[in-house]
Each structure stands twice: as structure tokens, then as C-alpha cells.
């Protein structure tokens, strides 16, 4: 019988290397070993702010909860899980990953709550309006049964929607579509916090308060900022989308001649907060977007409120983008879009002792908005700017503002008296506008 002939195995250089190393060679093995190793999955929870990326990189920088042990890494899908992970604002290093959208207006079993569920003490909007109508009540601060009932009802909502973030915490969304609805994230007197890749929307106040003033025209005061940094230090806010999505204030009714506002700021930085970087985020469809410094008389804010804002989008924002008191604010490579319809007041608010440096920002506006409309001053004295583009054309914000307001308001000086040292490359305004349109906001990291 003819012996079977075996096909000789062709040994490549890779196979010979394996044989010499004492390893068994199998046909096809070299093809498998030629594949590059798979890249490790990106873990946003362990990422920290890059060196030099804005004021939050000052000193020890901002690392959030990146050093958390495995026992303090959480994935949360509802309010109850989020509250448990936040642990009352404890300073233990922690990473909290949000999957999907968490509704803050829910009970401990996850049942949705609305304004009626919080109402107590006999509060009613019609009764409140009747009690404090300026024509009969006057300019005094509201007091009495309806105001007491409003406060009690508001306290019940605050217990649900105010979510306290402690020191050494990273709060991050998983993939696209992660966020918090109806909540007010608050960083109070805490240090080293990172908030990234989250959609934060509709921090809706069920019980706004009427605040008369001596001028005869009061205003409605709401309680909840979507994200509030109060006395916080070393905070990095990145790839966040903040808006009133769901309940836009421009659709609310008018009472006592004023819009019945339901939302406060999208991101407020107040009460001596310091060393903050806000990057690649989107602020949209809102009235008062961002307040830095909360009072002209709060002189303890001097030397604090150091904030960097870069590569952010302000879209359909009426005012405060930002409004600044006292702070040293570096504002570069941001894009502002003003819609053809809807209210618009200003973008950059220059207030008491603010020292803003604005570099290479782009503004896209309809025809009825002029360059001088972009800036408003309340007791402000300076604004340093360069590289500004207005509808594709280079402009000098300060010279145009001063010329437009000559004789009616104090001219703004152009030397902020400090030089930003902590920042990345500063692109042209046009290049930045394109990059922001492509990459700013939640779900767009990488």
C-alpha cells in the first residue's frame, strides 16, 4: 500500500523564532500573533484634568475621584442609587457613573413626582397671586399664610432635587444620553470635583417667590441652579449640556408684569468659589446662563472666582454668558449663537471689579443684534479682548462698546492687569467655532 504523503509545513521566520524559544509552533499561529493588542477601554472615571488646562489645574490640579478604590466606584440608574452613591456629600474618593437619564423628581421607589406632590400648607398659585398683587400688597416683602405655605412646599421639593456633591468626586455619564433631569447639582465648600459627559436639564422650580423692589417692578425668584459651585475649589466641568429642555421659560405666563420664571442659572459660580475650568460644554435655551460672583458687596470674593471658560457653546442664551464680579476670568475659543427670534440682552456682563480676558471668541447673530449689544456693564471698569469675530469679521468689542455708550456709561479700560498662564493652544475664533460645533456638549467626548 502506498504510504500517505504528508504536506511539509512551511515555517516562516516567525515560526522559527517560536521554535528557538522552545514554544510549539502551529500553522497559522504567526497570523494571530501579528495582530496588535486591543486598546484598553477608556475609563472616564479615572481621567483627570490635564496639566495647564485652565485655572482648575492650578496647584495640585483637579483629579476628582480618580483614586477611588473598587468599593467606591458606582454605576447608578435612578435617584435612590445616585443619592446613596453621593453619600451625603462625603469626601471619600468616589467615581459615580450615570447610566441613562435620572429623574430627580421621583420618590424612593422611583415613582414620578410633580408639583402637586410637594404642595402643602394650603398653598395655591391663584391664592398667592391674589395675596401679593402689587396693586394691593405694595412693595413689601411677602409675608403671611400663603408665603409660609410656599416656603414649606418649596422645602419639600428641595429635599428631592438638591443633590450634594462632596470633595474628591467624579460624576460622569456613560456614553450618550446620560444625564439628570430636574435636579440641582450642588458643590458646596468642597474641593477637587469633576463633572463630565452629562446632560443636565430642566431644574424646574414649582414654587417661585415674588420679590418686589423699591422701583415698583419686582421679579420672580427661582431656587435651583442646574449646577451650582458655592464656595467650591478645583472643579472641572467638561462636555456637559445644560438647558431648560422640557419647560422653556419663554413659554411660561406673565404675572405682575414679569415672566413667571421656573429656572435659575445653568451654572453659577459664587460665594468665593475658585479655580474652576469649564470646557467643551453647551449652554442652551435659557435666560440667565452663568453668574460668577453673587453680589457687589461681597468683597471677600476678591482674589477668588478664578475661572477659565474655553471651547463652550452658548446657544439661545438671553444673558449672563457669563456675568462676572471680582473674578479673574479667562474666556477663550467660545462660540455664541443668537437666534433670529426670541429675547436677547447681552453675552458678556462686566460687573464690580471683574477682570475678564476674552480671546478669540466667535459671535453669530441676526441682523438686529449689533456688536455693542454683546457687552453690558454694571459698575464694571475693564474688559481685555483680542481676536473677537462677529459674524465672520474681526471686531474690537471694547472700542465699539465705548463708542456706542459714550456719555452714558463709564468707558471700559483694556488692561486686566494679569496674564493667563494656564491654558491650552488658543485657536482663531473661526477654527474654534467649527470645533465647538463638532465636539462641545454631552456625548461628544473623543
Image (cartoon, helix red, strand yellow):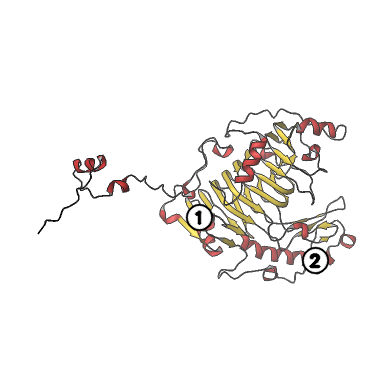
**Label 1 element class:** strand
Q: Is residue 54 left or right of residue 409?
A: left
Count the marks: how many? 2
N-terminal of the two: label 1 or label 2? 1
On the picture, is 117 further left or further right than 134?
A: left
Quadrant that contains the N terminus: bottom left
Residue matched to label 2: 128
| Local crowd size for mark 1, using a 10 Å CA cut-off: few (<14), some (14–19), many (≥20) | many
Residue lying at 80% horizontally and 61% vertically, measured from the top left: 253
According to the image, label 1 marks what residue? 96
Measured as percent of width and height from the top left, residue 183 is found at 62, 59
Mark 1, mark 2: which one is toward the viewer? 1
1 and 2 marks in contact (CB < 8 Å): no
Quadrant assignment, res 52: top right
List the single residue furthest toward the right: 135
Q: Residue at x 58, y 53 (%)?
A: 198
Q: Quadrant of residue 437?
A: top right
Looking at this view, is 429 or 97 the one in front?
Answer: 429
* Dot 2 alpha-carbon crowd within 10 angstroms: few under 14, some 14 to 19, many 20 or more: some
User: Where in the figure is residue 444, as x and y percent of width and height?
Assistant: 57, 49
Amino acid at each position: 500500500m502506498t504510504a500517505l504523503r504528508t504536506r511539509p509545513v512551511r515555517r516562516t521566520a516567525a515560526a522559527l523564532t517560536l521554535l528557538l524559544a522552545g514554544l510549539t509552533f502551529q500553522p497559522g499561529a504567526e497570523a494571530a500573533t501579528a495582530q496588535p493588542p486591543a486598546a484598553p477601554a477608556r475609563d472616564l472615571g479615572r481621567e483627570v484634568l490635564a496639566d495647564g488646562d485652565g485655572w482648575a489645574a492650578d496647584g495640585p490640579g483637579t483629579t476628582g475621584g480618580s483614586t477611588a478604590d473598587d468599593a467606591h466606584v458606582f454605576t447608578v440608574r435612578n435617584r435612590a442609587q445616585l443619592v446613596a452613591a453621593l453619600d451625603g456629600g462625603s469626601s471619600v474618593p468616589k467615581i459615580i457613573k450615570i447610566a441613562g437619564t435620572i429623574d430627580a423628581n421621583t420618590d424612593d421607589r422611583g415613582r414620578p413626582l410633580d408639583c402637586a406632590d410637594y404642595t402643602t400648607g394650603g398653598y395655591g398659585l391663584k391664592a398667592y397671586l391674589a395675596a401679593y398683587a402689587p396693586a394691593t400688597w405694595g412693595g413689601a416683602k411677602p409675608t403671611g399664610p400663603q408665603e409660609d405655605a410656599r416656603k414649606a412646599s418649596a422645602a419639600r421639593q428641595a429635599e428631592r432635587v438638591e443633590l450634594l456633591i462632596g470633595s474628591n468626586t467624579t460624576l460622569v455619564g456613560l456614553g450618550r444620553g446620560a444625564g439628570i433631569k430636574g435636579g440641582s447639582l450642588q458643590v458646596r465648600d468642597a474641593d477637587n470635583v469633576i463633572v463630565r459627559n452629562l446632560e443636565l436639564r430642566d431644574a424646574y422650580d414649582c414654587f417661585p417667590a415674588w420679590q418686589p423692589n423699591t422701583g415698583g417692578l419686582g421679579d420672580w425668584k427661582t431656587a435651583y441652579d442646574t449646577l451650582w459651585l458655592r464656595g467650591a475649589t478645583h472643579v472641572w466641568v467638561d462636555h456637559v449640556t445644560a438647558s431648560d429642555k422640557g419647560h422653556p421659560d419663554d413659554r411660561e405666563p406673565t404675572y405682575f408684569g414679569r415672566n413667571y420664571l421656573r429656572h435659575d442659572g445653568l451654572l453659577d459660580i459664587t460665594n468665593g468659589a475658585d479655580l474652576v475650568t469649564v470646557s467643551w460644554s453647551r449652554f442652551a435655551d435659557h435666560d440667565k446662563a452663568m453668574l460668577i460672583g453673587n453680589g457687589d458687596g461681597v468683597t471677600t470674593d476678591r482674589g477668588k472666582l478664578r475661572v477659565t471658560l474655553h471651547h463652550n457653546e452658548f446657544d439661545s442664551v438671553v444673558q449672563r454668558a457669563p456675568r462676572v464680579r471680582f473674578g479673574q476670568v479667562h474666556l477663550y475659543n467660545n462660540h455664541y449663537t443668537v437666534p433670529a427670534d426670541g429675547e436677547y440682552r447681552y453675552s458678556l456682563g462686566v460687573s464690580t471689579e471683574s477682570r475678564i480676558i476674552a480671546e478669540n471668541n466667535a459671535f453669530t447673530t441676526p441682523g438686529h443684534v449689533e456688536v455693542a449689544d454683546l457687552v453690558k456693564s454694571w459698575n464694571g471698569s475693564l474688559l481685555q479682548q483680542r481676536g473677537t469675530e462677529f459674524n465672520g469679521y474681526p471686531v474690537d468689542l471694547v472700542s465699539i462698546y465705548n463708542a456706542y455708550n459714550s456719555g452714558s456709561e463709564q468707558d471700559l479700560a483694556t488692561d486686566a492687569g494679569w496674564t493667563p498662564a494656564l491654558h491650552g493652544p488658543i485657536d482663531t475664533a473661526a477654527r474654534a467655532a467649527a470645533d465647538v460645533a463638532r465636539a462641545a456638549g454631552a456625548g461628544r467626548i473623543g
